[in-house]
Image (cartoon, grey):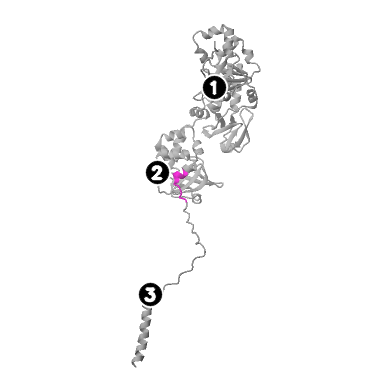
Amino acid sequence: MKKSIFVPVLLALTIVLAACAPAAAPAPAPAPTQAPTKVEPTAVPEMKKDIVDTAVAAGSFKTLATALQAAGLVDALKGAGPFTVFAPTDEAFAKLPAGTLDALLKDPKALGEVLKYHVVSGAVKAADVVKLSEAKSLQGEPIAIKVDGGKVMVNGANVVTTDIETSNGIIHVIDAVILPPSMAKAEDKMEAKDIVDTAVAAGSFKTLAAALQAAGLVEALKGEGPFTVFAPTDEAFAALPAGTVEGLLKDPKALAEILKYHVVAGKVLAADAAKLTEAETLQGAPIAISVKDGKVMINDAEVVTADVMAKNGVIHVINKVILPPAEGAMMDKKMDIVDTAVAAGSFKTLAAALQAAGLVETLKGAGPFTVFAPTDEAFAALPAGTVEGLLKDPKALAEILTYHVVSGKVMAADAAKLTEAKTVQGAPIKISVKDGKVYINDAQVTTADIETSNGVIHVINAVLLPPK
């Protein structure tokens, strides 16, 4: 009896002890037969820049960035936002009437009003913009929104690029600067300048203004128009052969022909001009229009600034004077050394000396010659009575003048490689380069490479004297 009770108790105790015992250690895993697969790190998405840094990085909003800085709005547009910015390009700012941008940069308060008028609170994508008729700007006044022929317009500006996402909002690019209605009304009250006054105010068209006056075209270009003027800068006129401008100013008829060749009837903006291959000028002959490497060319002149708006038309700035076919053909026929010097107007003493020494016909010959030509000021710097004495001594004068002449056509780049050159007089002249300037003996070359039909002229600021 006792045995039958003991067996089940012993069995139960065995089960309990087995449950309380530690688990047996697992059998060791077999050694791996190949290297474990390498886990690549997850790519970190590139952090978006804020509105200001995005605009700066784009490279086409330099004026906008400068304006934001001047108006003290940089930190505001680098803030949390979100903002929607209708951002005018550099070309958009360039379309403003001459002097407008400079005036705004000097008036931070007004500039700030204009810039805040380009900003809307919130991130408004293009798909949402097109559903609106207006949006309130940070400046306080509403921006008018219109969809016309598939194009979105804010006020009168076209939205040309949409939905540039940034860390604190959205940028939509526009092709014109928009003005708050209150400022636009004030602007309308100010009389816009006509083409002539706009050119004069710019300060870089002094020669053009003088030429228009001499040709009697000022009143015509101050008329109702509209006109499109391709305006050469002062540098463009200065690049013409020596004496050309002076000669033209004395020939109003020829000058008027050239100037009218720079004018087209109607108001032709750059975007429209780029679609043309030619346009008829007021002079009658057409100008050729082409686009090369993204640059608009008028004949062989480059448009360097487009769409300068005026009351009676538009100005496009070009870097060369363009010539009608007839005048161009005449200009291609270069004058000889003597006639070029005479036409320049600053070599009267040299011309008189050549005449007195009997060298005019020689220097009008086939050549080629290289002439180091002293200006009237250079002759005037000689001791008192020297020029008068030489004019009475043709032989001595000829010795001096031929000492300024080298056989052959030696351009400045070639002259700078020499240490001396033999003159027609027989004695050599010394050539040196100091601080980037070319010297002939002790005289400095002030203007180089004036090409003529029979050689080249280099202007110098002192008279050279041959060794005794």
Count of numbered badges drawn on the protein? 3
Among the 4 quarters of the image, the one containing residue 113:
top left
Res 363 visible = yes
**Which residue position holds label 1?**
447
Q: Return the disc, 3 or 1, that comes first in the chain's sequence.
A: 3
**Closer to the camera in the image, 14 or 67:** 14
Res 343 visible = no
Q: Amino acid at mark 3?
A: Pro
Task: Give the quadrant of the N terminus.
Answer: bottom left
Say what secondary structure mark 1 lies in.
Answer: strand
- Of tags 2 and 1, which is closer to the observer? 1
**Which residue position holds label 3?**
22
Q: CA distance from mark 3 to mark 2?
A: 68 Å
Q: Position of residue 223 (x, y in %)?
A: 54, 28
- Left or right: residue 324 versus residue 168 is right
Q: Return the disc, 2 or 1, that comes first in the chain's sequence.
A: 2
Q: Does the stretch in magenta take in 419?
A: no
**Which residue position holds label 2?**
75
Q: CA distance from mark 3 to mark 1?
A: 105 Å
Tag of residue 357 = none
Q: Residue at x 36, y 80 (%)?
A: 17
Q: What is the magenta range? A: 46-55
Say what secondary structure mark 3 lies in.
Answer: loop
Q: Position of residue 239 (x, y in %)?
A: 56, 25
**Closer to the camera in the image, 184 or 330:** 330
